[in-house]
Image: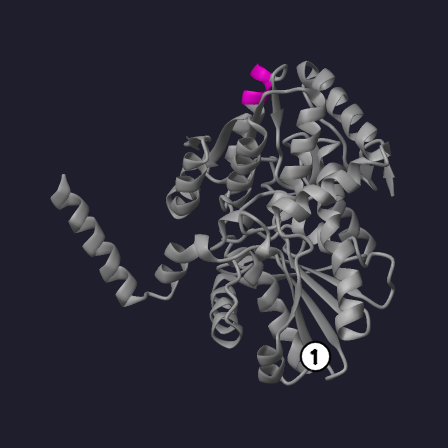
Amino acid sequence: MFENGYYGQFGGAYIPEILVATFQQLEAAFNQAKNDPTFFPEYEALMASYSCRPTPITYAENLTNHFGGARIYVKREDLNHTGAHKANNVMGQGLLVKRMGKKRVIAETGAGQHGVATATMAARFGLECTIYMGEVDVARQRPNVFWMERLGAKVVPVTDGSRTLKDAINEAFRDWVNNMDTTHYVLGTACGPHPFPEMVQYFQSIIGKEARKQILQIAGKLPDHVYAVVGGGSNALGIFSGFLNDSGVELVGVEGGGKGLDTKQHASRLCSDDASIGVAQGYKTYFLQNADGQMCETHSVAAGIDYVGVSPILSHYHETGKVRFEAATDKEVVEALTLTVRKEGIIPALESSHAFAQAFKEAPSMSKDSVILINQSGRGDKDIFTVADALDDPSWRQFIIAKAEEYRARK
């Protein structure tokens, strides 16, 4: 499947000549680490002591009874340090940064979880850190911006284009071109030029390795269906990696359906007619683009999946039928989050809630012997403003108004 940075026809490294040496250095460091028998155990030990690994699997008994079909289990990546699966990739890349001897890291972020994780890693390893974030996402993910800055990172709002994740990635690449001798770009998802997709999948595979062993112990069998949200694709590739060779396990990736696939206001690349194959941001994959190859604006209630592209690895799995892709609308996602909170006392991130939404659509029609595994890629604390607004919560609205008046009075 994999050859010279390609997954079938997807992937590659479409980069300016000035970055070739930097990518060669990164690929060499990554290959050296992979071939070092002490590296992955060092990584696992770091994650065990610093990030609560292995994360558990929770049997969602109340949701199972509510739907009356398949048994529902949840892989709890929300219990990672910093509240999401992002720490897995970031801490692994941090170990590579140490090997390469670089002193500064940069990153892009949409939902802010990758930004917080990168800032945390930089604080842990004593590195200078700059985070690029679309201006729209800065506004809707203010709690994460607050913590990035407290951790010592410089957060740069990006005002170009749609002012979301795509534009943050562009700005991060511009920074890297100018500072490549001292700086490593901690790309947060399994996209971008080779070796980033492979590297991110490698570190996130810790999810699937754990999940396969755990579900066999807890449920007594492999899952019949595994659900994960798909933005760029890092959490999905992480959990799918544990079951890729199991023919009886169906893998389901869930994209951002936004306001509906017929509205053009969505972030669905692999199950909509609005995407086509192209090359952008250093790699070849499906992008939401027009006939001239210009990137379209995307929409999702979840900032972390509001992105025009998708991992080239997942594009390959889509073409070969290895993974089934679906889309969940904003409305379905908020409803799934609300139900999960009420029934299980678990608060999934809006991103993760896409996987819950699709699983909830399908669980009732499955037999009681079926097992569903949902990857909860992150926790929903960061989404309190967005969710409260979506639910039009009057108490929350009054709280915000009172706080704003209190702030004005102090000024």
Q: Which residue is drawn at 47% across and 65% down?
A: 334
Residue 258 horizontal/vertical position (percent): 51, 57
Residue 119 horizontal/vertical position (percent): 52, 35
The reply, left or right, for residue 19 in relation to residue 79 is: right
- Vertical placement of 306 versus 71: above or below? above
Residue 125 horizontal/vertical position (percent): 59, 30
Q: Quadrant of residue 378?
A: bottom right
Rendered-image quadrant of the N terminus: top right
- Vertical placement of 98 versus 247: above or below? above
Q: What residue type is labelled 1?
A: Ala
Q: Residue at x 84, y 31 (%)?
A: 4
Q: Which residue is drawn at 75% across and 57% down?
A: 210
Q: Quadrant of residue 44?
A: top right
| Colour approach in the figure | one colour
> In this rendering, does residue 166 appear at all?
no
Residue 62 horizontal/vertical position (percent): 58, 80
Q: Which of 79 and 17 is in front in this view?
A: 79
Rendered-image quadrant of the C terminus: top left
The reply, left or right, for residue 230 in relation to residue 222 is: left
> In this rendering, does residue 104 appear at all?
yes
Q: What element carries label 1?
A: loop
- Vertical placement of 2 versus 397: above or below? above
Q: Main secondary structure of the magenta part?
A: helix
Is 318 contained in the magenta span? no
Q: Which residue is drawn at 32% across and 66% down?
A: 393
The residue lying furthest to the left in this view is 409
The residue lying furthest to the front in this view is 49
**Count of numbered circles on the image:** 1
Answer few, some or many: residues within 10 Å of disc 1's Cα (few below 14, many 20 plus, some between 14 and 19).
Answer: many
What residue sits right under mark 1 in the picture? 70
Identify the magenta region.
175-179
